[in-house]
Image (cartoon, rainbow, N blue to C red):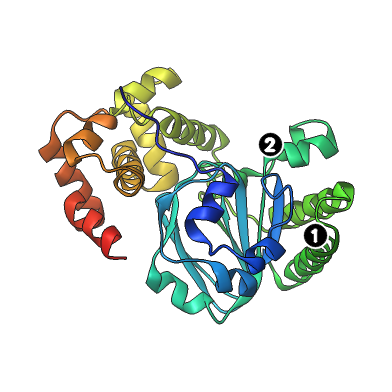
Amino acid sequence: MKSKIKTFKPNELLEEYMDAGTKRNQVFKEGYERFFIARLEDLNEIVKPPIPPTRSRMHSILFVTSGKLKMKVGAHSVKIQENECVIIPHRQVFSASLDDYKDITQGTGFNFGFIDDFIIEQIANTELLNTFEFLTVWGNPVIRPHKTIAKYIIQSLNRIFNEYAQNGLQNPLILQAHLIATLCDLKMDYKPLSNSNNKTAVALTNRFKELLHQNIRTKHQVSDYSSLLHVSPNHLNKTVKLITQKSPSVWIGETLVSESKVLLFQSSQSISEIASELGIDDQSYFSRLFKKHEGVTPIAYRKMIDLS
């Protein structure tokens, strides 16, 4: 029977990637599975890099105030620097290599994470939350705020950090209010991956990405998704390529490889079993697809993980 690709709970991420001890307990307060905030310089003392491809049940946002940060979020290789941030939506695959950590070890900033309910319980509905496209798997994972907005964001994050450090989640209304303000400030300078004015095409493309994320293990053909979207394969191909500069088939291949990287790390399954887990019966095809996107075979990639 096929097993689902593991989505880590917050406590599992801590156990897997952070050294246990007093420092970790100081950084992550009781209730951190709903909300947390930490300084990057504090996390650098306890994080155990590299972080192989994985995913979390929380949204995570990293805002850099000095230095640089590199990582992989979904199909995107991102790099940010001072007063910029990267967003990792919940259930999105992310990873960071040893080389990625070299720049940030001397940097500063904030990493904060939260679940949807932490916001919803304050605003009593999902309408505002749904306007933050950067919290979706199809959103742009990088935001580069203008100087004035960055200043406001840093002020809010310092207020949130000080409250959290002193009182944990004892005063959630304060944390929620400043968190919502921070998300609204980020939204002001958020730039979608496409600057197209064709809202219908953008909406179709975003829906395709969402369905792709949900169905990648069972649906690998463009026609599968065009059927779900009630359009022709040709129309879907032209629309997605117009908006993203990549065809639906490329998106499908990249997503399959992203999912397989999680399995290569999380399980001891054979390559053929992983291929089967993803709905691919031909192991040789799976290996060719993986090498096409990653430059190495699945076996070589797993060895790289073991060596790290």
Residue 152, placed above or below residue 299: below
Residue 257, image x, y percentages: 30, 44
> What residue lies at 23% left-to-right and 56% top-to-bottom?
301
> What residue lies at 73% left-to-right and 52% top-to-bottom?
183
Residue extending farthest to the left is 284
Residue nearest the observer in this picture, 12 or 200: 12
> What residue lies at 35% left-to-right and 41% top-to-bottom?
259
Residue nearest the observer in this picture, 265 or 89: 265
Q: How crowded is mark 2: few (under 14 residues within 10 Å), some or many (20 or more)?
A: few
Type of amino acid under label 1: Tyr
Q: Nearer the viewer, mark 2 or mark 1?
A: 1
Instruction: Report the side of 45 relative to 158 (left or right).
Output: left
Label drawn at residue 164 = 1
Label drawn at residue 297 = none
Specify the quadrant that holds the N terminus: top left
Distance CA(mark 2)–CA(mark 1)? 25 Å
Displayed quadrant of residue 149: bottom right
Residue 196, image x, y percentages: 53, 46
> What residue lies at 28% left-to-right and 27% top-to-bottom?
221
Type of amino acid under label 2: Asn
Residue 36, image x, y percentages: 70, 54
The residue to which callout 2 is attached is 130
